[in-house]
Amino acid sequence: MAAKKKKGARKYGKKASSTVAKTMRKRKKGTLKSGGSGRKVTSRKQAIAIALSEARKSGAKVPKRKKASKKRASKKRASKKRASKS
């Protein structure tokens, strides 16, 4: 049986939400840049991802990043099996 989640427990802290708000304002202004390439960020999803990673670094209450999907891993295993059979 899965553990029940506490009712009313916040998934994200106040600090995280304020970081997201600041980042969204930057994006709207056109001054938000991505870390890797330094290009301007226009995607809403990317802006949120940047904000949450910044919040994590600063120690805010943010859930852990989701790992790569299990689909990829199972595909790799299946291809290895096919390769070893032939």
Image: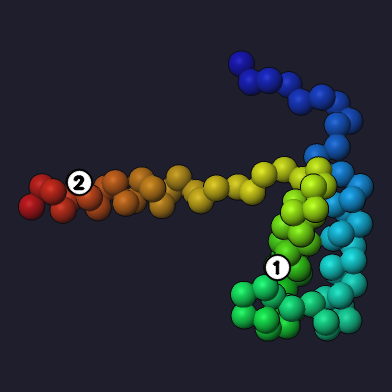
Question: What residue lies at 82% left-to-right and 47% top-to-bottom?
Answer: 60
**Image check: 38 left or right of 55?**
left
* Label 1 sits on residue: 46
Q: CA distance from mark 1 to mark 2?
A: 36 Å
- Name the side, left or right, on which 13 lies relative to 35: right
41, above or below 62, in the image: below
Q: Is 24 positioned to the left or the right of 72 in the image?
A: right
Say what secondary structure mark 1 lies in: helix
Query: Dot 2: what SS?
Result: helix
At horizontal 13% and vertical 48% (from top left) the residue drawn is 84
Q: Does the image show residue 52?
A: no
Residue type at mark 1: give it: Gln
Give yes or no for contact between labels 1 and 2 (Cβ–Cβ under 8 Å): no
Type of the residue with mark 2: Lys
Question: In which image quadrant can residue 61 be found?
Answer: top right
| Residue drawn at x 17%, y 50% as measured from the top left | 82
Q: Earlier in the sequence, mark 1 or mark 2?
A: 1
- Identify the mark at residue 81; answer none if there is no mark: 2
Residue 44 seen in the figure: yes
Give percent across and percent down for residue 72.
41, 52
The image quadrant where one finds the N terminus is top right
Nearer to the camera, 50 or 80: 50
Residue at 70% in and 68% down = 46
The circle drawn on residue 3 is none
**x%, y% of residue 30?**
83, 83
Q: Position of residue 17 (x, y in %)?
A: 88, 53
